[in-house]
Amino acid sequence: MVVLTEPDIDHLPIIINSCKSPSFFNDIPVIDLSKPDSKNLIVKACEEFGFFKVVNHDVPMDFISKLESEAINFFSSPLSEKLKAGPADPFGPADPFGYGNKKIGQNGDIGWVEYILLSTNSEFNYQKFASVLGVNPENIRAAVNDYVTEVKKMSCEILEMLAEGLNIHPTNVFSKLLKDEKSDSVFRLNHYPPCPDIQEFNAKNLIGFGEHTDPQIISVLRSNNTSGLQVLLKNGNWFSVPPDQNSFFINVGDSLQVMTNGRFKSVKHRVLTNRVKSRLSMIYFGGPPLSEKIAPLPSLMEGEESSLYKEFTWFEYKKSAFKSRLAENRLTLFEKFGAS
Ligand code: GA4
């Protein structure tokens, strides 16, 4: 089992009351990617939840296991070694990539989590991770590339089904942004060690990763069989997503919310820690190139419908996002009418 060194409990946010799922809501939408008629179900899931689970995907299990075992080896290394793989520029967005421990972003957010943040661009330097593991950096690059390539392929397939379901032509309007060689996509490995005994606080759950929406177009998450992920339902209740290591969980990001003029909602989610088991998740965040204008697609604007958002580029959004706190609504700044 992977254990995080030195808990620093004083600085962690605690939820006193954990919320139960409402009784009328039993599960999240499940999309069978092998069924051709899934496109309408995907549209419905994005409209109603901004979140769904994907089964019968083509991502090879050995790519998943290979990367998972590299991640477990890395997170099992001594903290002093892992810290050597920290970001080059921990206090600015110039190079946020690398190992991080409890600190999320640069604006004071913390969680019971350690992580590795990577750029999916092909020139990314894996040397600092390889040094911790004492392996050739090309082995790590290959493990990440094999996994990300497959997950990106699946994301593009899903985005094309979405476009078809929405009757948008050409159907690559969303997927071409991820396929662009300048696509600003990131990849994250999160490790949530078992949380310590917090009886003395009379608290039920500790926050692993605080509530937030993802900035990009689409996020694809895969985790081991440990629970913790929760999504916020429209009725204001948190729903605990049952873990499933053989499936992927997809969520709509802020950019897709804008491109669909609010038809799809970027879903708020968070991760609670587990007392007994470690949780390990890998998330691919598919984003557009920095210069891309993020705006509602003209083909989706029916009749008199006008854009809910001011025009902005992904670079402008990102610049402001990286100054924000995790839980903030990062789209407020770009709304035309001030309400989301
Ligand atoms: C949330 C989604 C991704 O994990 C992430 C996060 C990023 C970071 O960890 O550096 C941010 C967060 C995320 C949004 C607001 C800012 C930036 C932390 C934070 C407080 C990698 C991303 O792209 O945006």
Image: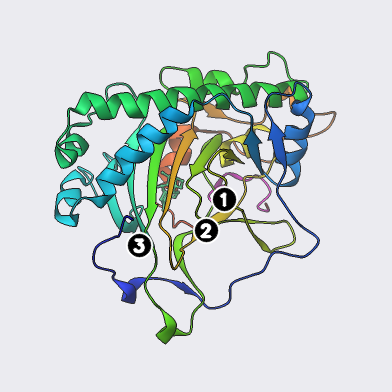
Q: Which span of residues is magenta-colored?
A: 330-339
Q: Secondary structure of the magenta portion, mostly?
A: loop
Which class describes the residues within 10 Å of circle 1: few (<14), some (14-19), or many (20+)?
some
Residue at 31 percent across and 23 percent down: it is: 142
Instruction: Let me know if residue 304 appears in the view.
Output: yes
The residue identified by callout 1 is: 243
Asked if one can make out residue 290 in the rendered structure from this viewpoint, the answer is: no
Q: Quadrant of residue 33?
A: top right
- Alpha-carbon span between mark 3 and mark 1: 29 Å
Q: Is mark 1 within 8 Å of ligand 1?
A: no
Image marks 2 and 3: residues in contact by CB distance under 8 Å: no
Residue 332 drawn in magenta: yes
The residues tagged by marks 2 and 3 sit, at their Cα atoms, a distance apart of 22 Å
| Residue that label 3 marks | 108
Measured from the top left, where is residue 83 in percent x and y? 18, 51
Amino acid tagged 2: Gly
Is 333 located above or below residue 53 in the figure? Answer: below
Residue bearing the label numbered 2:
228
Foreground tag (3 vs 1):
1
